Image (cartoon, grey):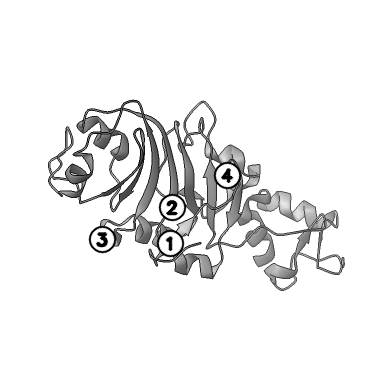
């Protein structure tokens, strides 16, 4: 029964569905030998219809989120979970986004089913740097970098000032912004506070993880080395 529960928890179906898979001979070992529901659990050797199982619980994924997708499962439009196999919606423990990117923002998004890891990443004390590339509607003001770095900028509706952030000017209307916290629509609200408007926004880095050449809409499961880089902000992916 442990084997049935494990496979069902990965989203392949209910326990009853998985039991039928065993009866139909669809679940085998790596050599093609049919497995039975009471066989020992050996995740890496199990195959369903000849394909290896999805990663076990403790999963951390990196997605290149395209524009037009939201992070909410309740949104009636396109959501980031549409970019994964349908069974990923049914994993137990559930797969959740680590923070959010709004519909009009692209770039690096992490997802995990590990609650402790999720909270470690988003906890204010972690101060993991998040790096964004912004395209702006108007020319940058000469004082924007100093204002963002001051640690005194107060956004509308907020009761505490923002932590210092680093602005790198890449052109008259292009900039790279590094944040050390995550507030609601923070990048857009920061540029609005200095009289500008974000026309395009892309997150390229969290901690020591970079998107590199991962195409939009694609994802990868991260290994232990990548997790180490995540919490080593000076590292590169």
Mark 2 or 4, nearer chain start:
4
Residue toward you, 84 or 113:
84
Q: Which mark is residue 125?
A: 3
Which callout, 3 or 4, points to the residue nearer the camera?
3
Q: Residue at x 63, y 61 (%)?
A: 6
From the image, tell me which residue sits under label 1.
208
- State the SS at label 4: helix
The answer to whether mark 2 and mark 4 are in CB contact below 8 A is no
Question: In the drawing, does residue 99 fall left or right of residue 160?
Answer: right
Q: Position of residue 106 (x, y in %)?
A: 48, 38
Label 2 neighbourhood size at 10 Å, few (<14), some (14-19), many (20+)?
many
Q: Secondary structure at mark 1?
A: loop
For label 2, the SS is strand
Report, in whole angstroms, how far the alpha carbon at label 2 lies from the one at label 3. 18 Å
Query: Sequence order check: which comes first, mark 3 or mark 4?
Result: 4
Q: For the residues marked 1 and 3, what is the alpha-carbon distance in whole angstroms?
A: 17 Å
Local packing at callout 1 (Cα closer than 10 Å; few below 14, some 14-19, many 20+) is many
The answer to which of marks 4 and 1 sits earlier in the sequence is 4
> In the drawing, does residue 4 fall left or right of residue 123?
right
- Residue at the disc numbered 2: 205
| Mark nearer the viewer, 4 or 1 | 1
In space, the residues marked 2 and 4 are separated at their CA atoms by 25 Å
How far is disc 4 from disc 1 in space, using C-alphas?
28 Å
| Residue ID for mark 4 | 89
Mark drawn on residue 162:
none
Q: Quadrant location of the N terminus?
A: bottom right
Q: Secondary structure at mark 3?
A: helix
Closer to the eye: label 2 or 3: 2
């Amino acid at each position: 029964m442990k084997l049935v529960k494990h496979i069902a928890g990965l989203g392949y179906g209910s326990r009853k569905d998985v039991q039928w898979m065993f009866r139909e001979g669809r679940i085998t070992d790596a050599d093609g030998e049919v497995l039975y529901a009471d066989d020992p659990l050996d995740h890496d050797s199990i195959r369903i219809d000849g394909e290896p199982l999805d990663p076990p619980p403790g999963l951390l994924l990196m997605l290149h989120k395209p524009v037009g997708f939201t992070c909410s499962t309740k949104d009636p439009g396109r959501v980031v979970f549409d970019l994964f196999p349908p069974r990923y919606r049914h994993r137990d423990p559930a797969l959740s986004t680590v923070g959010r990117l709004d519909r009009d923002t692209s770039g690096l998004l992490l997802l995990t089913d590990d609650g402790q890891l999720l909270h470690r990443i988003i906890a204010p004390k972690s101060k993991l740097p998040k790096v964004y590339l912004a395209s702006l509607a108007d020319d940058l003001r000469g004082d924007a970098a100093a204002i963002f770095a001051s640690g005194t900028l107060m956004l509308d509706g907020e009761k505490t000032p923002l932590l210092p952030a680093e602005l790198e000017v890449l052109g008259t209307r292009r900039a790279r912004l590094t944040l050390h916290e995550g507030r609601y629509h923070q990048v857009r609200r920061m540029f609005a506070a200095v009289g500008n408007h974000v026309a395009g926004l892309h997150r390229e880095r969290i901690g020591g993880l970079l998107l590199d050449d991962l195409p939009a809409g694609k994802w990868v499961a991260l290994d232990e080395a990548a997790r180490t880089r995540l919490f080593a902000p000076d590292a590169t992916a």
